[in-house]
Image (cartoon, grey):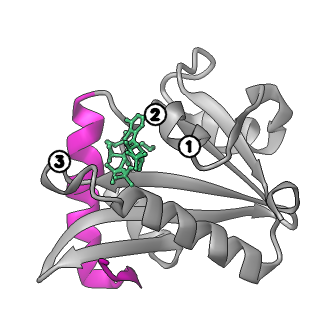
Amino acid sequence: MNQVEKARIPDVPQIHQLINRFAGKGEMLPRPLSELYEDVRDFFVIREGEQVVACAALHVSWSDLAEIRSVAVAEDSQRKGLGDQLVATCLKEAAELGIATIFCFTYQPEFFRRQKFADIDKMELPRKVWTDCFRCPKFPNCDETALIYHAEEQA
Ligand SMILES: CC(C)(COP(=O)(O)OP(=O)(O)OC[C@H]1O[C@@H](n2cnc3c(N)ncnc32)[C@H](O)[C@@H]1OP(=O)(O)O)[C@@H](O)C(=O)NCCC(=O)NCCS
């Protein structure tokens, strides 16, 4: 079992590389380095030695809402359960914070559906749309799928 750890500042350039490698292939949206430093406390990582091989972030949106974003697992480390482990860790942290509703925007909806996320209309997430989405180059032609997880429904 790989260990999930909170990200540290020296991990940020590697997180940036990991996310932007997939973003370059159109598999996720890019994240600027400056934003990743600002959001470093959102991130969990899995390392192999000094190398970050997987990352995911839990970003608090409001009193009752958080987003899982930037889930990325290096190609050689995929299909070994790391993605599942990271999402589970984000959901656990949300529960510890007292947040029961977690959403994500993704090009891999099937991966999240397996984790009991359900599809949702993006317009039901107005806070996301009018903050992050509004700044996205693809706005308003978003081609990601929005999904939502309600902790109390899983209990
Ligand atoms: C999507 C991604 C995070 C999955 O990570 P992973 O570590 O390979 O996933 P896991 O090994 O934990 O897989 C868990 C389960 O999801 C399934 N799964 C993995 N990737 C999947 C995908 N793309 N579509 C559907 N199911 C998928 C696996 O088969 C596994 O199920 P199983 O145990 O029943 O076989 C990884 O492929 C990735 O980083 N992709 C590029 C970036 C990206 O698309 N991120 C999406 C989130 S924004």
Circle 1 is placed at which residue position?
112
- Quarter assignment of residue 35: bottom left
Name the secondary structure under disc 1. Answer: helix
As shown in the figure, which amino acid type bears the numbered disc 1? Phe
Q: Looking at the picture, tell me which residue is in the foreground, 20 or 153.
A: 153
Circle 2 is placed at which residue position?
108
Q: Looking at the picture, tell me which residue is in the foreground, 39 or 120.
A: 120
Tally the numbered discs.
3
Q: Which residues are magenta?
A: 1-25
As shown in the figure, which amino acid type bears the numbered disc 3? Glu
As shown in the figure, which amino acid type bears the numbered disc 2? Gln
Q: Residue at x 43, y 74 (%)?
A: 44
**Would the CB of label 1 be found within 8 Å of ligand 1?**
yes
Q: Residue at x 80, y 38 (%)?
A: 125
The answer to which of marks 1 and 3 sits earlier in the sequence is: 3
Per the model, the C-alpha gap separating discs 3 and 2 is: 15 Å
Circle 1 Cα neighbour tier, 10 Å, few/some/many (<14 / 14–19 / ≥20): many
Q: Quadrant of ligand 1?
A: top left
